[in-house]
């Protein structure tokens, strides 16, 4: 009986690094990308349900006045609201940010924790935010799973999951730890460019041969279903439908 070959993360990460010119993904993350862990924490909470451009604008305004746990913990939500308005839900977020800063100050002496469990105990912190702090704040292996990572991991066929939380658990259980850190930045880039939610450009994709969806589409089969994470299979032609290749948009 033949056994399925393990997924080649090495080749996929190499191909995505080359595609998006990010440099060698093997370089320890903090050498080139060190960020303040507190600002990663607060910025990731701010980024919920908004665009990156809004998060960037609000983060710059917020950190210009409240750059650390001590200053933000002493703020009133009404002082925060106008600074983060662009991100939406700004009243709720302002209260959460102050509560998070107070918890970091009171329970952890102003130092953002370096482990998942205490991070997850902070107000407003879910699995994605906690993993972002590990990876982008400390360079500690973690797997932040947002909608891009969830969708692409399912399209690749490395998981079959319904939620980002399930995807994180499966990736942690099955992917060697040395690949965890580059997965998020590279798959997010890929999700914003070629492997978009709708009409992914499988025809231009440098990892199509490693991808279950890409291979299925190339061979004219319906892609494997993974709930809402994969593109819809091409519609079946009826006799009266105009003759055209049903998977053309993926193969061009
Ligand atoms: S082949 Fe298509 S579905 Fe697979 S990773 Fe590339 S763009 Fe995404």
Image (cartoon, helix red, strand yellow):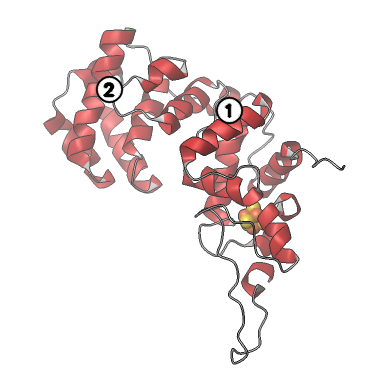
Residue lying at the far top in this picture: please name it: 109
For the point 51% across and 47% down, which residue is it? 148
Using the image, determine if residue 117 lies above or below residue 159: above
In front of the other: label 2 or label 1? 2
Q: In this view of the protein, which residue sits in the foreground, 232 or 82?
A: 232
Q: In this view of the protein, which residue sits in the foreground, 242 or 227?
A: 227
SS for tag 1? helix
For the point 59% across and 23% down, which residue is it? 31
Tell me how many marks there are.
Answer: 2
Report which residue position mark 1 lands on.
32
Report which residue position mark 2 lands on.
100
Q: In this view of the protein, which residue sits in the foreground, 80 or 120?
A: 120
The answer to whether residue 89 is seen in the rendering is yes
Query: Where the C terminus falls, by quadrant?
Result: bottom right
Residue lying at the far right in this picture: please name it: 1
The answer to whether residue 205 is seen in the rendering is no
Q: In this view of the protein, which residue sits in the foreground, 170 or 143?
A: 170
For the point 73% across and 58% down, which residue is it? 215
10 Å crowding of disc 1: few (<14), some (14-19), many (20+): few
Q: Quadrant of residue 59?
A: top left
Residue lying at the far bottom in this picture: please name it: 240
């Amino acid at each position: 009986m033949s056994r399925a070959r393990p997924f080649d993360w090495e080749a996929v990460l190499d191909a995505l690094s080359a595609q998006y010119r990010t440099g060698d993904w093997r370089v320890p993350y903090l050498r080139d990308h060190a960020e303040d862990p507190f600002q990663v924490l607060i910025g990731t909470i701010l980024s919920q349900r908004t665009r990156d451009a809004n998060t960037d604008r609000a983060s710059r305004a917020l950190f210009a006045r409240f750059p650390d746990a001590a200053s933000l913990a002493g703020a009133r939500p009404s002082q925060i609201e106008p600074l983060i308005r662009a991100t939406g839900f700004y009243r709720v977020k302002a209260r959460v940010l102050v509560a998070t800063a107070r918890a970091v100050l009171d329970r952890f002496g102003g130092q953002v924790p370096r482990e998942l469990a205490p991070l997850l105990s902070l107000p407003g912190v879910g699995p994605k935010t906690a993993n972002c702090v590990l990876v982008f704040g400390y360079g500690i292996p973690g797997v932040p799973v947002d909608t891009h990572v969830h969708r692409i991991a399912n399209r690749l066929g490395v998981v079959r999951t319904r939620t980002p939380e399930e995807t994180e658990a499966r990736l942690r259980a099955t992917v060697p730890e040395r690949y965890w850190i580059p997965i998020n930045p590279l798959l997010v880039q890929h999700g914003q460019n070629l492997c978009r939610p709708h009409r992914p450009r499988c025809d231009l994709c440098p990892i199509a041969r490693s991808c279950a969806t890409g291979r299925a589409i190339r061979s004219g089969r319906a892609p494997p279903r993974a709930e809402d994470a994969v593109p819809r299979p091409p519609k079946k032609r009826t006799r009266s439908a105009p003759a055209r290749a049903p998977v053309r948009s993926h193969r061009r």
